[in-house]
Image: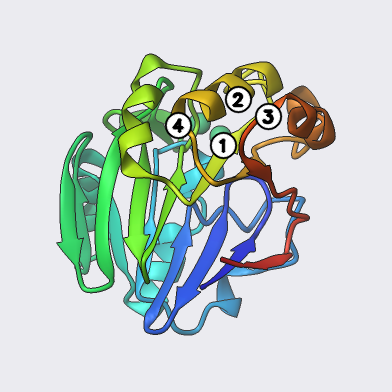
Amino acid sequence: MIIKYLGHAAFYIESGDFKALIDPFLRGNPQTKSRPGDFKELSHIFVTHGHSDHLGDTLEIAKRTQAKVVSNYEIVNYLMSKGLINVHPMHIGGRVKLGFGTVKMTSAVHGSSINEDGQIIYAGNPGGFVIETDGKKIYHAGDTGLMMDMKLLEDEMIDLAILPIGGNFTMDIEDAAKAVAMIKPKKVVPIHYDTFDIIKASPEAFEKLVKDAQVIIMKPDEEYRL
Ligand code: NI
Ligand code: MN
């Protein structure tokens, strides 16, 4: 399985026919050289919540590639109102079998709304995803503060946890290290930092705080084989 970090909270994951984006914020993302048009063939797009740095270029990429968009009910309805047909609505706590394996939507302590023409559109509760495919389990936390619900993820036996560390809008490095202690993943990738001045953080300092998990510090546009 190839995991490519596209900066901020965006990832591309490929394993056989499973070619997926998570939170594809590409245009306006100062950390990545990837552009929406780079993704010619995609099977799925996962969207954790409605904020523009996560919903990103979902609509454009999904329209072009016909990738199935997996998100909460409200965001899926919003995207359907914009013409998307290949969608899968789900919600917090729900798990579903799709062609590639399973996906569970997890809770996140955060906000979720879509700003459009000065209007705020309700986008349901924010979430994260536990994606199981190719015998591996990946947890993308989305944007979240530290929460006791992370303790529930210990039973999932997560191979790779993708956690925000930038502070201000999400966990900082101290809280993210506490999250790792609760989730007990084998490996962890810190994200959602240094994109903007207000979320500056040191992934090396985070690594020093983490016990019992391998910290993988990924540079934007870098690939990792899981
Ligand atoms: Ni957010
Ligand atoms: Mn965010």
What is the quadrant of the C terminus in the image? Answer: bottom right
Q: Can the viewer see residue 97?
A: yes
Q: CA distance from mark 1 to mark 4?
A: 11 Å
Is tag 3's residue or tag 2's residue first in the polypeptide sequence?
A: 2
Q: CA distance from mark 3 to mark 1?
A: 12 Å
Q: Amino acid at mark 4?
A: Ile
Labels 2 and 1 touching (C-beta < 8 A): yes
Residue located beneath label 1 in the image: 163
Q: CA distance from mark 3 to mark 4?
A: 12 Å
Left or right, 101 with respect to 57, comes to left
Q: Amino acid at mark 3?
A: Val
* Distance from mark 2 CB to nearest ligand 2 atom below 8 Å: no
How many other residues sit within 10 Å of disc 2, few (<14), some (14-19) or many (≥20)?
Answer: many
Is tag 3's residue or tag 4's residue first in the polypeptide sequence?
A: 4
How many other residues sit within 10 Å of disc 4, few (<14), some (14-19) or many (≥20)?
Answer: many
Is tag 2's residue or tag 4's residue first in the polypeptide sequence?
A: 2
Q: Residue at x 47, y 38 (%)?
A: 142
Q: CA distance from mark 2 to mark 1?
A: 7 Å
Q: Kindly state the secondary structure of the residue where label 4 is placed.
A: helix
Is tag 1's residue or tag 4's residue first in the polypeptide sequence?
A: 1
Q: Name the disc covering residue 176, or none.
A: 2
- Quadrant where ligand 2 appears: top right
Residue 94 placement: quadrant? top left
User: 59 or 216: nearer the eye?
Assistant: 216
Closer to the observer: label 1 or label 4? 4
Labels 1 and 4 touching (C-beta < 8 A): no
What sort of colour scheme is used for the picture?
A: rainbow
